[in-house]
């Protein structure tokens, strides 16, 4: 018992001499981890090329110089119904605006009344529901018609809709779609009063 007491006393004395009068430094805590900066989501700009082709119906009306038939009947207004095809290629800057070039030709229907048109259009569009877009066309083009030797340049406009069978990636169209539209490539209020009405349907592929 005396030995145990003596041992405890020596231990106490030793510890006092070792740390006597000195503060014991606290344990060092590891530094808190620095939170990583959140990575920015990759934004795919809705930009892309597309090509399209389809069928066209054109109804043209021209109040040109009166025509006299073989029966002596004067016809003050010339009309024609022709059919053909349309070709287009465009570039979508984003899901709201694009630029498009198009060509139409109608070699079938009324004889010698083929219509040809080439134009450049600004194409504002809006995603109405799901994969259905509606759009407008505002541009300038050259229109020729074999009948009455119509060869005019002027303002052109139209409206249309397109349904996409493919998918959208951050607003960008990918894959096949179908379109239907009404356009007026030419309207001249002068001595001839030319009005050109065109309906187009077709398919387009977005890259």
Image (cartoon, rainbow, N blue to C red):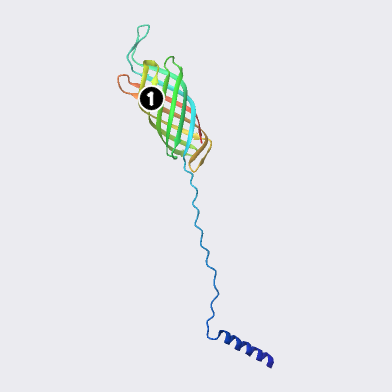
Residue 69: percent from the left, percent from the top? 37, 9
Image mark count = 1
Residue 11: percent from the left, percent from the top? 63, 87
Image-based side of 3 in relation to 203, left or right: right
Residue 189: percent from the left, percent from the top? 31, 23
In the rendered view, would you say 203 is above or below 7?
Answer: above
In this view of the protein, which residue sits in the foreground, 108 or 206? Answer: 206
Residue 130 seen in this snapshot: no
**Quarter the N terminus occupies:** bottom right
In the rendered view, would you say 97 is above or below 4?
Answer: above
Residue bearing mark 1:
142
Q: Residues within 10 Å of mark 1 (few under 14, many from 20)?
A: some
In this view of the protein, which residue sits in the foreground, 195 or 94? Answer: 94
Residue at the outermost top position: 71
Residue 150 seen in this snapshot: yes
Residue at the outermost left position: 191
Residue 157 in which image quadrant: top left
State the residue at coordinates (59%, 85%).
15
Residue at the outermost bottom position: 2
Residue 24: percent from the left, percent from the top? 54, 80
Residue 93 in which image quadrant: top left
Residue 97 in which image quadrant: top left
As helix, strand or loop, the secondary structure at mark 1 comes to strand
In this view of the protein, which residue sits in the foreground, 128 or 8? Answer: 8
């Amino acid at each position: 018992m005396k030995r145990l007491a003596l041992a405890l006393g020596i231990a106490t004395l030793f510890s006092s001499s070792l740390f006597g009068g000195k503060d014991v430094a606290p344990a060092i805590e590891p530094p808190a981890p620095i939170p990583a900066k959140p990575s920015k989501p990759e934004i795919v700009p809705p930009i892309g090329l597309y090509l399209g082709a389809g069928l066209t119906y054109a109804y043209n009306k021209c109040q040109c110089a009166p025509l006299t038939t073989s029966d002596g009947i004067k016809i003050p207004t010339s009309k024609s119904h022709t059919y053909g095809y349309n070709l287009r290629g465009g570039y979508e800057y984003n899901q709201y605006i694009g630029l498009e070039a198009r060509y139409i030709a109608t070699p079938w229907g009324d004889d010698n009344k083929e219509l040809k048109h080439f134009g450049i259009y600004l194409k504002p569009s809006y995603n109405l529901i799901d994969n259905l877009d509606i759009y407008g066309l505002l541009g300038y083009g050259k229109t020729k018609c074999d009948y009455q030797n119509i060869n005019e340049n002027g303002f052109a406009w139209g409206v249309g809709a397109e349904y996409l069978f493919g998918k959208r990636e951050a607003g960008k169209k990918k894959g096949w779609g179908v379109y239907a539209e009404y356009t007026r490539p030419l309207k001249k209020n002068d001595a001839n009063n030319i009005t050109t009405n065109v309906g187009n349907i077709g398919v387009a592929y977005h890259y």
